[in-house]
Image (tube, rainbow, N blue to C red):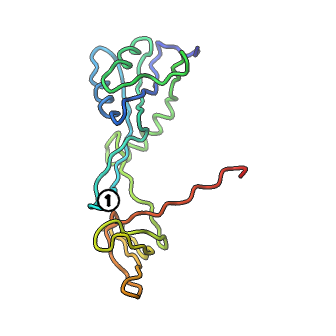
Amino acid sequence: MSDADPNKLAWYCVRTQTKREHIAAEHLRGRDGVEVEVFCPRLRYRKPTRRGTIWWLEPLFPGYLMAKFRLAEADRTVTFCQGVSGLVRFGADVPEIPESFVESLRREYQADAGESEILTVSPDLKSGEEVEVANGPLAGMSGVVVEIAPAAERVKILLEFLGQPQVVDIDLFSILLPRKPLPPKPGM
């Protein structure tokens, strides 16, 4: 058993039902009579698909959110809230999340246009990288990035087309970034 004080206001990791993190967060925020603060960080990014570019929103920690409450007072209220599967436990112990970790995440997320739980992510692309066109008449073709215009969300790609190299101007979110190899594991 943990030596943490269950009457102390602390952050805990809450396990949610699959793809229902935002629903669980809203229901926990709406609880009357019990003090529960919720932080459910999500990432927003543009995702190229064969049918065009779409905005995609997904949780930073799929299947989990963070909630600050007094364990002795709100354990059952949080555990049986709609969208919640339970608290993360190790046997009978419910570990606390360090306040510094949550505050660090919050600072990162508040820097993004004032939205407190959504961070917009842009592609990390450099000149010279090989990419693939995701949609349009050039879909499936590979080329090398020549120039990036982030303000206009455009990229110039050098493609081998009609037997000679051609520079093509394409929407930044219409390309598939190359998969970068994972670094080797230590000791291998």
- Residue 185: x and y in percent read 66, 50
Image quadrant assignment for residue 141: bottom left
Relative to 134, say whether 89 is above or below: above
Residue type of the residue flagged with mark 1: Thr
- Using the image as rendered, state which of residue 58 and residue 116 is in the foreground: 58
Relative to 29, say whether 113 is above or below: below
- Using the image as rendered, state which of residue 27 and residue 115 is in the foreground: 27
Quadrant of image for the N terminus: top right
Residue positioned 51% across, 20% down in the render: 94
- Residue 186: x and y in percent read 69, 50
- Using the image as rendered, state which of residue 7 and residue 95 is in the foreground: 95
Relative to 114, say whether 16 is above or below: above
Image quadrant assignment for residue 156: bottom left
Mark 1 crowdedness (10 Å alpha carbons): few <14, some 14-19, many ≥20: some
Can I make out residue 151 in this image? no
- Residue 51: x and y in percent read 26, 61
- Residue 79: x and y in percent read 38, 19
Task: Quickly name the residue at label 1.
Answer: 49
Can I make out residue 167 in this image? yes
